Image (spheres, rainbow, N blue to C red):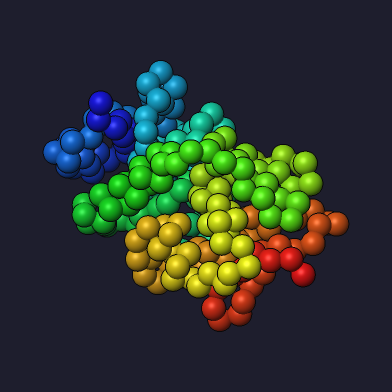
Amino acid sequence: MAELILVIEDETNIAQFLERGLIYEGYRVEVAFDGQRGLAIARDNPPNLVILDWMLPGLDGIEVCRRLRAASEVPILMLTAKDGVPDRVIGLDAGADDYLVKPFSFDELLARVRALLRRSVPTSRPEVLRFADLTLDTGTHRATRADRAIDLTAKEYELLELFMRNPRQVLTRDVIFDRVWGYDFGGESNIIEVYVRYLRQKTETDNDQRLIHTVRGVGYVLRED
Ligand code: CA
């Protein structure tokens, strides 16, 4: 059965534009014009992906994003008219996997939808990756450090998996963009820093040694001191 995409967008012309285009591309589509309705649909008929507008009447997109994320790991693509980095970081903090600034082209939206859906499909047999006292289960997406459980968002998981599959190798920013985001991110160059910061916050408590090291001007490397 075709993948189900839930569009939560109060602007009817944009919602209909997305609905028609996505159906034409072979997806099933549900549309909600406000956050409450969107959450109800997501609960009753879990989608494979959510396209979520930031500016919604009533519950705003950020709050909807938090509630969706609290209930599932469904990939969330946020739409925003806001262009400032702090706003984007708020969206990512709330658990969005990606965001697109309006106005956007349908082709660009489609590329991101495909990338998010592709990454959410398990492609290989689950295994437990280990590095130092860090483990990552590719089946359950659960991480531990020194037996302490670590909750990861979908994107944080992908970034950590990339590091864990390539220990002691310097990963350039281009490689990380390509492997984790799956398309050319253009000028949005701080997104890797944002996610590395999230991973460090989650995997390094006071007494833990640093494992994800910055290689200035190049990228990052997972290694022990
Ligand atoms: Ca709106």
Residue 73 spot, x, y in % from top left: 50, 36
Task: Determine the residue positioned at 40% across, 53% down.
Answer: 99
Task: Determine the residue positioned at 53% across, 29% down.
Answer: 71
Q: Is residue 35 visible?
A: yes
Left or right of residue 201, residue 62 in this image: left
Task: Determine the residue positioned at 41% across, 46% down.
Answer: 119
Residue 155 spot, x, y in % from top left: 51, 50
Image quarter for residue 221?
bottom right
Q: Nearer the viewer, residue 67 or 23?
A: 23
Is the N terminus in the top left, top right, bottom left or bottom right quadrant? Answer: top left
Residue 153 spot, x, y in % from top left: 55, 44
Q: Is residue 52 visible?
A: no
User: How many labels sit on residues?
Assistant: 0
Q: Residue furthest right?
A: 207
Q: Please determine whether, in this image, residue 67 is positioned above or below residue 182.
A: above
Image quarter for residue 50?
top left
Image quarter for residue 204?
bottom right
Q: Nearer the viewer, residue 96 or 122?
A: 122
Q: Please determine whether, in this image, residue 78 is positioned above or below residue 31.
A: below
Task: Determine the residue positioned at 36% across, 70% down.
Answer: 186
